Image: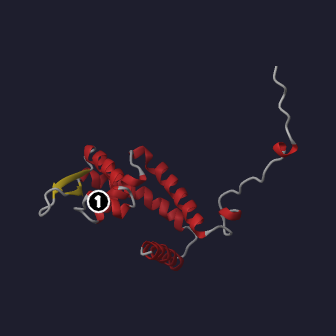
Amino acid sequence: MRKPRRITKSQTERTQVPPAPGEGKRGEEGYLGYLLRQAQAAVRLSMERSLADLGVTPPQFAVLTMLKAYPGLSGAEVARLTFLTPQTVGVIISNLERDGAIGKTPHPVHGRILQWTLTARGKTLLKTCRERVVALEQRLAAGLDAKAEITVRRWLARIATELQQG
């Protein structure tokens, strides 16, 4: 027969409860990089929820958005623009093509490179997705006046530009 395990005082003491988002190190006291990551995770979760019934994931939305903005991109170019791996983009492109949202044509000079564009179905799907994402972005910008929103956009773009350069 086993002896009952003895519980020490330190095992029964409760450690500090982690703060909720926006509090302590998860708020204004936190590192900027952590706060950016926390905000990005919250945005992604909200986007996942808003697009779920359409069968579209945030990475698929990003691919559709880039193909609308820059028709004829190759898979490698899409990967660079969406910050996804080429392997992930390959899977996304296969799924979007299977669903009839995008189509391919061979590159006019480099025949092995495929160029991707939205189909009519893809444009309709993206329009519906975009309406939902715009609503999310309005929530993100709530409380910001036009000048503050421009400042935040410039700051985020500058971070991306400067930190990618090394």
Residue labelled with disc 1: 76
Image location (x, y in percent) of residue 85: 37, 56
Image location (x, y in percent) of residue 8: 86, 41
Image location (x, y in percent) of residue 5: 83, 31
State which quarter of the image contains the N terminus: top right
Q: Residue at x 32, y 56 (%)?
A: 64
Q: Residue at x 33, y 55 (%)?
A: 86
Name, please, the residue furthest toward the right.
9
Q: Residue at x 39, y 48 (%)?
A: 56
- Closer to the camera, 58 or 52? 58
Count of residue discs = 1
Question: In the shown orientation, is residue 155 left or right of residue 101?
Answer: right
In what element is the residue under mark 1?
Answer: helix
The residue under label 1 is which amino acid type? Ala
Toward which corner of the image does residue 130 lie, by quadrant?
A: bottom left
Question: In the shown orientation, is residue 165 left or right of residue 6?
Answer: left
- Closer to the camera, 146 or 30? 30
Question: In the shown orientation, is residue 127 left or right of residue 140?
Answer: left
Name, please, the residue furthest toward the top.
1
State which quarter of the image contains the C terminus: bottom left
